Image (cartoon, grey):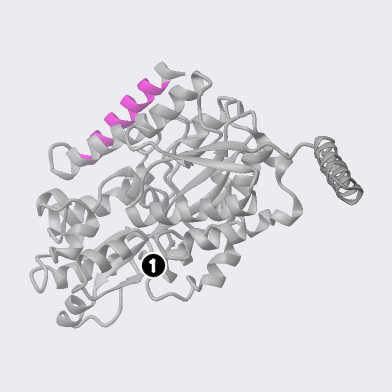
Amino acid sequence: MNKSKWLYFWGLLITVAIIVISCHHLPPSKSSVTIKLSGWGGSPVEQKLLKQVLQDFEVKHPNIKVKYEVISDQYMDVIKTRLIGEAAPDVFYLDALEAPFLMSQNVLEPLDNYITPEFDLADFEENLLNSFKYQKHIYGLPKDYSTLALFYNKKAFSKAGLDSPPNTWNELRSYSQQLTGKLNKYGFGESPELARQAYKIKAYGGKIVDKKGNATFASESGLKGLNLVIDQYQKERTSVLKSDVGASSGSDMFGQGKVSMVIEGNWAIPYLQETFPQIDFATAEVPTINNKKGTMVYTVAYVMNKQTKHKQAAWKLISYLTGKEGMEKWTGKGFALPTRKSVAEKLGYDQDNFRSALVAGVDYATPWQVGKYPAAIANNFDNQFISALLGEQPLNQAMLRAENNANQQIKMME
């Protein structure tokens, strides 16, 4: 080998050696972290949409991987069991109904110290954010919500000579009489569960639970709101339950044309458009009761497991999903309403033909939240109220029985 080749060979060898040594002394790349996110299943379209949002998050945060798990059965029982066994996911869905109990158990990470001014906490609807506050700490950030609105059949209204939706509950009952037996068999489809009736109890100054968390819906003022339902169903016979007409839900009996009006949430809009495209319907705010506006609001938050070993990564995921960009992607298709005012405005939902009535109700809505032991409250109410509605016992007797049973159960659980 001649001299020039030797020089070339040694030069190449030295270059390779320098590269190897340099690489050896480079700071190690950040190791990736896997965050487990758990929730319940929605429609296939919603699931696909969420997975796309999570993929967008991973692109922005290449060192964080998200493992998404759907718990399709007994969701809260599974979560509670895993929390006890310290095997819960890093981030998970928490319904406002279940939040008071978990927030009181020291199993959730308070989010106050993670929230920066740039996150713009004031942009959230206050009524929704308050459902996830406990002892002056924020434990969850609401990802979406729905209120209730009046859905009415425009063709049925036209046939009955009605050109606008009812503004008061008395008008709704009058409309129901005019609509019953026309295009539809009944004027109004009723949903008797406490989750749909709580705002009626509040309309006359009644309460569902007291400050101690005990049931108190059997008060005289609370019964006034519930009597509206009893009278319309028993005396006027212009309202009907889903079980009376072989329907699976309020939306279903409306879509089937069994009733001219129902009070439903945002979920009913895509359901009716896809399943019953022939129905020409419109929405309006829930009619006032006792001169007071009222409706319900249901919301779900992302919360952080206090035992997670990846708190900063978990916060990055929560802050993206509930931040302006992530929320716009998640709620942009209309399956859910954004909890941030700026996102709702940007998407135009406050002006939307179907959704504006739902958005308008968020400020005055009653949150679906009834203390630390919601099952005892709701189950006893639902069982006894149905009994009263069917005429098996007087309303005051039924509600007193429900209240006493609920409070006995709560006492045993405390």
Q: Is residue 404 magenta?
A: yes
Which residue is depicted at the point 46% across and 53% down?
A: 50
Task: State which region is magenta.
Answer: 394-410
Q: Is residue 80 above or below residue 361?
A: above
Q: Position of residue 369 (x, y in %)?
A: 45, 41
Quarter occupied by the N terminus:
top right
Q: Position of residue 197 (x, y in %)?
A: 33, 49
Q: Amino acid at mark 1?
A: Glu
User: Is residue 228 at all visible to an observer of this figure?
Assistant: yes
Q: Is residue 300 above or below residue 349?
A: above
Which residue is depicted at the point 40% across and 28% down?
A: 78
Q: Position of residue 37 (x, y in %)?
A: 50, 39
Which residue is depicted at the point 38% across and 25% down?
A: 407
User: Is residue 322 at all visible to an observer of this figure?
Assistant: no
Q: Quadrant of residue 162?
A: bottom left
Q: Is residue 6 magenta?
A: no
246 left or right, relative to 37: left
**As rendered, which of 396 and 368 lies closer to the eye?**
368
**As rendered, which of 70 and 106 lies closer to the eye?**
70
* Majority secondary structure of magenta residues: helix
Q: Is residue 16 above or below residue 84?
A: below
Q: Position of residue 353 (x, y in %)?
A: 39, 76
Residue under label 1, please give it.
285
**As rendered, which of 367 and 26 lies closer to the eye?**
26
114 left or right, relative to 399: right
